[in-house]
Image (cartoon, rainbow, N blue to C red):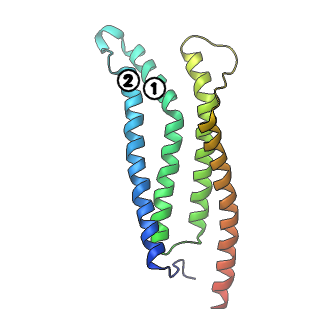
Protein backbone atom coordinates (compact mmCIF):
# COMPACT_ATOMS: atom_id res chain seq x y z
CA UNK A 1 0.00 0.00 0.00
CA UNK A 2 1.50 3.32 -1.10
CA UNK A 3 1.15 6.39 1.10
CA UNK A 4 1.98 8.76 -1.73
CA UNK A 5 -0.76 10.17 -3.91
CA UNK A 6 -0.34 11.87 -7.25
CA UNK A 7 -1.21 15.54 -6.74
CA UNK A 8 -1.33 18.49 -9.08
CA UNK A 9 1.58 20.89 -9.35
CA UNK A 10 -0.60 23.69 -7.92
CA UNK A 11 -1.47 21.60 -4.86
CA UNK A 12 2.15 20.56 -4.39
CA UNK A 13 3.37 24.16 -4.72
CA UNK A 14 0.68 25.52 -2.39
CA UNK A 15 1.43 22.93 0.27
CA UNK A 16 5.15 23.63 0.00
CA UNK A 17 4.61 27.40 0.39
CA UNK A 18 2.31 26.81 3.35
CA UNK A 19 5.09 24.78 4.95
CA UNK A 20 7.56 27.64 4.36
CA UNK A 21 5.10 30.15 5.83
CA UNK A 22 4.51 27.92 8.86
CA UNK A 23 8.27 27.66 9.42
CA UNK A 24 8.56 31.45 9.13
CA UNK A 25 5.81 31.95 11.69
CA UNK A 26 7.47 29.31 13.88
CA UNK A 27 10.68 31.38 13.83
CA UNK A 28 8.86 34.62 14.62
CA UNK A 29 6.97 32.95 17.46
CA UNK A 30 10.19 31.49 18.89
CA UNK A 31 11.79 34.96 18.86
CA UNK A 32 8.69 36.39 20.56
CA UNK A 33 8.86 33.73 23.29
CA UNK A 34 12.53 34.53 23.80
CA UNK A 35 11.69 38.24 24.10
CA UNK A 36 8.99 37.60 26.72
CA UNK A 37 11.46 35.63 28.84
CA UNK A 38 14.31 38.09 28.18
CA UNK A 39 12.14 41.00 29.36
CA UNK A 40 11.64 39.23 32.67
CA UNK A 41 15.31 38.48 33.33
CA UNK A 42 17.14 41.03 31.16
CA UNK A 43 17.67 43.70 33.81
CA UNK A 44 18.49 41.30 36.61
CA UNK A 45 21.98 40.52 37.83
CA UNK A 46 22.97 37.25 39.51
CA UNK A 47 25.05 39.03 42.16
CA UNK A 48 22.49 41.59 43.24
CA UNK A 49 19.19 39.83 42.70
CA UNK A 50 20.10 36.29 43.66
CA UNK A 51 19.81 33.16 41.57
CA UNK A 52 16.52 32.15 43.17
CA UNK A 53 14.89 35.43 42.18
CA UNK A 54 16.28 35.17 38.65
CA UNK A 55 14.97 31.58 38.41
CA UNK A 56 11.58 32.80 39.64
CA UNK A 57 11.52 35.52 36.97
CA UNK A 58 12.54 33.00 34.29
CA UNK A 59 9.69 30.71 35.40
CA UNK A 60 7.29 33.65 35.36
CA UNK A 61 8.43 34.45 31.82
CA UNK A 62 7.75 30.84 30.77
CA UNK A 63 4.28 31.04 32.32
CA UNK A 64 3.57 34.29 30.47
CA UNK A 65 4.80 32.70 27.23
CA UNK A 66 2.80 29.48 27.75
CA UNK A 67 0.04 30.29 25.20
CA UNK A 68 2.69 31.13 22.61
CA UNK A 69 4.59 27.93 23.38
CA UNK A 70 1.46 25.90 22.61
CA UNK A 71 1.01 27.88 19.37
CA UNK A 72 4.64 27.07 18.56
CA UNK A 73 3.87 23.35 18.79
CA UNK A 74 0.86 23.80 16.49
CA UNK A 75 2.97 25.66 13.91
CA UNK A 76 5.66 22.98 14.05
CA UNK A 77 3.09 20.27 13.35
CA UNK A 78 1.45 22.23 10.53
CA UNK A 79 4.84 22.91 8.89
CA UNK A 80 5.54 19.18 8.82
CA UNK A 81 1.98 18.39 7.67
CA UNK A 82 2.19 20.75 4.70
CA UNK A 83 5.64 19.44 3.73
CA UNK A 84 4.34 15.87 3.71
CA UNK A 85 1.33 16.96 1.67
CA UNK A 86 3.64 18.64 -0.85
CA UNK A 87 5.33 15.25 -1.24
CA UNK A 88 2.01 13.55 -1.99
CA UNK A 89 1.51 12.08 1.49
CA UNK A 90 -2.00 13.36 2.07
CA UNK A 91 -4.43 10.84 3.52
CA UNK A 92 -2.16 9.17 6.08
CA UNK A 93 -2.52 8.24 9.73
CA UNK A 94 0.46 10.47 10.49
CA UNK A 95 -1.35 13.50 9.06
CA UNK A 96 -4.48 12.67 11.04
CA UNK A 97 -2.35 12.53 14.19
CA UNK A 98 -0.69 15.84 13.27
CA UNK A 99 -4.07 17.53 12.73
CA UNK A 100 -5.32 16.25 16.09
CA UNK A 101 -2.15 17.46 17.78
CA UNK A 102 -2.45 20.87 16.12
CA UNK A 103 -6.05 21.18 17.25
CA UNK A 104 -5.08 20.14 20.78
CA UNK A 105 -2.24 22.68 20.83
CA UNK A 106 -4.63 25.46 19.79
CA UNK A 107 -7.12 24.41 22.49
CA UNK A 108 -4.32 24.37 25.08
CA UNK A 109 -3.13 27.81 23.91
CA UNK A 110 -6.65 29.18 24.36
CA UNK A 111 -6.99 27.60 27.81
CA UNK A 112 -3.56 28.86 28.85
CA UNK A 113 -4.32 32.37 27.61
CA UNK A 114 -7.74 32.59 29.24
CA UNK A 115 -7.22 30.78 32.55
CA UNK A 116 -3.91 29.07 33.28
CA UNK A 117 -1.47 31.93 32.64
CA UNK A 118 -3.49 34.68 34.38
CA UNK A 119 -4.06 32.44 37.41
CA UNK A 120 -0.42 31.31 37.71
CA UNK A 121 0.93 34.84 37.22
CA UNK A 122 -1.26 36.08 40.07
CA UNK A 123 -0.26 33.18 42.32
CA UNK A 124 3.46 33.52 41.57
CA UNK A 125 3.24 37.30 42.08
CA UNK A 126 1.97 36.71 45.61
CA UNK A 127 -1.77 37.15 45.06
CA UNK A 128 -3.09 33.62 45.53
CA UNK A 129 -6.73 32.84 45.72
CA UNK A 130 -9.19 31.70 43.14
CA UNK A 131 -9.01 31.41 39.41
CA UNK A 132 -8.45 34.38 37.17
CA UNK A 133 -10.28 34.32 33.83
CA UNK A 134 -9.17 36.68 31.06
CA UNK A 135 -10.93 35.56 27.90
CA UNK A 136 -11.03 37.82 24.85
CA UNK A 137 -12.02 37.52 21.20
CA UNK A 138 -8.61 36.24 20.12
CA UNK A 139 -8.58 33.57 22.82
CA UNK A 140 -12.06 32.41 21.85
CA UNK A 141 -11.07 32.43 18.16
CA UNK A 142 -7.99 30.28 18.79
CA UNK A 143 -10.12 27.86 20.81
CA UNK A 144 -12.73 27.71 18.05
CA UNK A 145 -10.00 27.05 15.47
CA UNK A 146 -8.68 24.25 17.67
CA UNK A 147 -12.13 22.66 17.79
CA UNK A 148 -12.54 23.07 14.02
CA UNK A 149 -9.18 21.45 13.31
CA UNK A 150 -10.03 18.57 15.66
CA UNK A 151 -13.26 18.14 13.65
CA UNK A 152 -11.33 18.23 10.38
CA UNK A 153 -9.02 15.54 11.78
CA UNK A 154 -12.05 13.26 12.29
CA UNK A 155 -13.17 13.88 8.72
CA UNK A 156 -9.61 13.39 7.47
CA UNK A 157 -9.54 10.04 9.31
CA UNK A 158 -12.52 8.93 7.19
CA UNK A 159 -10.54 9.92 4.09
CA UNK A 160 -7.66 7.71 5.28
CA UNK A 161 -10.05 4.77 5.69
CA UNK A 162 -11.55 5.32 2.22
CA UNK A 163 -8.05 5.54 0.72
CA UNK A 164 -7.02 2.29 2.45
CA UNK A 165 -10.16 0.60 1.16
CA UNK A 166 -9.50 1.81 -2.38
CA UNK A 167 -5.85 0.73 -2.21
CA UNK A 168 -6.97 -2.82 -1.39
CA UNK A 169 -8.73 -3.04 -4.76
CA UNK A 170 -5.72 -1.83 -6.74
Residue at coordinates 59% horizontally, 72% vertically from top-left? 91
Whether residue 153 appears in this view of the structure is yes
For image coordinates 68% across by 14% down, the residue present is 129
Q: Is residue 117 left or right of residue 69?
A: right
Q: Residue at x 59, y 22 (%)?
A: 120
Residue 87 visible in the displayed image: no
Q: Position of residue 51 (x, y in %)?
A: 37, 15
Q: Which mark is residue 61?
A: 1
Q: Where does the N terminus fall, quadrant-wise?
A: bottom right
Q: Quadrant of residue 17?
A: bottom left
x, y percent for residue 135? 65, 30
Residue at the location (69% across, 65% down)? 155
Q: What's the distance in space between the residues labelled 1 and 2, CA to CA?
A: 8 Å
Which quadrant of the rendered structure holds the C terminus?
Answer: bottom right
- Dot 2 corresponds to which residue? 39
Find residue 92 and name its label: none
Residue 148's place in the image compared with 89, above or below, is above
Amino acid sequence: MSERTEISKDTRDSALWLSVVAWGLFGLMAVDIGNVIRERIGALSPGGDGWLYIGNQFGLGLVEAMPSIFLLFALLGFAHLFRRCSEGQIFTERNVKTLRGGGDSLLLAAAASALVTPTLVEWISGNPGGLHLQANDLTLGVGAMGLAIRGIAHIFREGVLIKQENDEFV
